[in-house]
């Protein structure tokens, strides 16, 4: 007696269904947004002092309110370009000696970074005037600092100086630029620009703005429209760009204030995070500390 084994027929419908599923899954994966890495440079402070250590879990990154995955946190490379904007209007006359000391201390510290940034020195009393174009040499910048002298009868044009500087940074295609401005609050501002124009100029150059503001007891009398716009730049735009406004109460405090600022710039962090590759780029970036004792300084505009 012979036992006949039935030969299995290929299940064609099932095989076709599986093939269709695999094809559909592949197409879906191909159409799904791919995550691309973005890097942003931030400053992280605890009690006003740069932190020595930072872990991915210490910070939260959101774009347009959506949390992003943090891939890595590492010490940021130094700035490629630093533009120093200095108020040499008549209001700065009593500060010149301390101002020069502070600028020299700042320049000495930042030009010792590896690699050293190119430093540009511009005054903005009466009009923006470049004393030293972008140069990584301390001695070259220091010679320019020695030339700073108050301009009798001159007011300030800070906003114009910022806009002109951002154009120079874009011309040089500066990768990691920042702008440091010294401003005397008591002096008048004569720029015709609005704070929104300054913010847009900083965003186009991807530059952060850091301000040391020398205040006078009781502030200053009166408030013109141009001074209101300057106050908005110093108060709001600095924060939106990822920089800070630091108030200095007396010119004798300027050297230490400049040293503290240089230490913050030298201790920044680079945060790398993932973002889905979508057709519509995000408009707003928000980076915060997971714990309230951490203060994160980061630009509000999203990385390109």
Image (cartoon, rainbow, N blue to C red):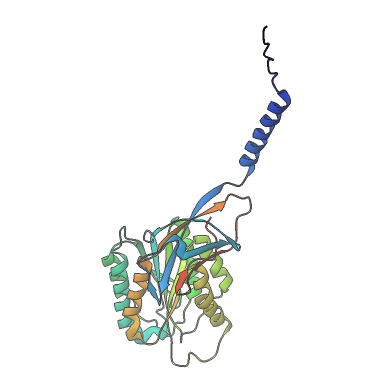
Q: Is residue 262 left or right of residue 39?
A: left
Image coordinates of residue 277 in percent, x first then y, are 58, 49
In depth, the one of 262 and 297 nearer the eye is 297
Residue found 34% across the figure and 81% down from its top: 254
Residue found 67% across the figure and 7% down from its top: 2
Q: Is residue 176 left or right of residue 259?
A: right
In depth, the one of 266 and 60 nearer the eye is 60
Residue extending furthest toward the right: 13
Which quadrant of the rendered structure holds the N terminus?
top right
Image coordinates of residue 210 in percent, x first then y, are 44, 72
Q: Is residue 247 left or right of residue 258?
A: right
Image coordinates of residue 147 in percent, x first then y, are 31, 75
Residue found 56% across the figure and 73% down from its top: 195
Residue 133 seen from this side: no
Residue found 42% across the figure and 67% down from its top: 43
Height in image: 46 above or below 76?
A: below
In depth, the one of 244 and 286 nearer the eye is 286
Q: Quadrant of residue 47?
A: bottom left
Q: Quadrant of residue 146?
A: bottom left
In depth, the one of 201 and 247 nearer the eye is 247
Residue extending furthest toward the front: 1
Height in image: 75 above or below 278?
A: below
């Amino acid at each position: 007696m012979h036992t006949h084994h039935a030969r299995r027929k290929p299940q064609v419908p099932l095989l076709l269904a599986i093939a269709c599923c695999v094809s559909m899954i592949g197409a879906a994966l191909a159409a799904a947004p791919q995550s691309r890495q973005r890097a942003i440079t931030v400053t992280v402070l605890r009690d006003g002092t740069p932190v020595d250590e930072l872990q991915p879990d210490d910070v939260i990154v959101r774009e347009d309110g959506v949390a992003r995955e943090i891939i890595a946190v590492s010490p940021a490379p130094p700035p490629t370009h630093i533009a120093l904007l200095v108020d040499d209007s008549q209001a700065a006359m009593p500060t010149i000696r301390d101002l020069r000391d502070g600028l020299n201390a700042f320049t000495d510290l930042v030009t010792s970074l590896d690699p050293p940034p190119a430093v540009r020195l511009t005054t903005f009393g009466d009009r923006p005037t470049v004393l030293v174009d972008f140069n990584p040499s301390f001695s070259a910048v220091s010679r320019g600092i020695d030339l700073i002298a108050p301009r009798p009868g001159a007011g300030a044009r800070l906003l114009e100086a910022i806009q002109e500087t951002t154009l120079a940074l874009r011309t040089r295609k500066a990768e990691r630029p920042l702008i440091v401005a010294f401003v005397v609050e008591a002096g008048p501002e004569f720029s015709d620009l609005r704070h929104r124009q300054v913010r847009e100029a900083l965003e186009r150059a991807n530059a952060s703005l850091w301000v040391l503001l020398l205040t006078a007891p009781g502030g200053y009398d009166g408030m013109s429209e141009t001074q209101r716009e300057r106050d908005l730049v110093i108060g709001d735009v600095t924060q939106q760009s990822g920089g800070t406004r630091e108030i200095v109460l007396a010119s004798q405090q300027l050297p230490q204030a400049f040293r503290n600022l240089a230490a913050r710039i030298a201790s920044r962090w680079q945060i790398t995070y993932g973002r889905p590759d979508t057709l519509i780029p995000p408009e707003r970036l928000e980076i915060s500390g997971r714990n309230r004792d951490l203060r994160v300084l980061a630009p509000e505009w999203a990385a390109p």
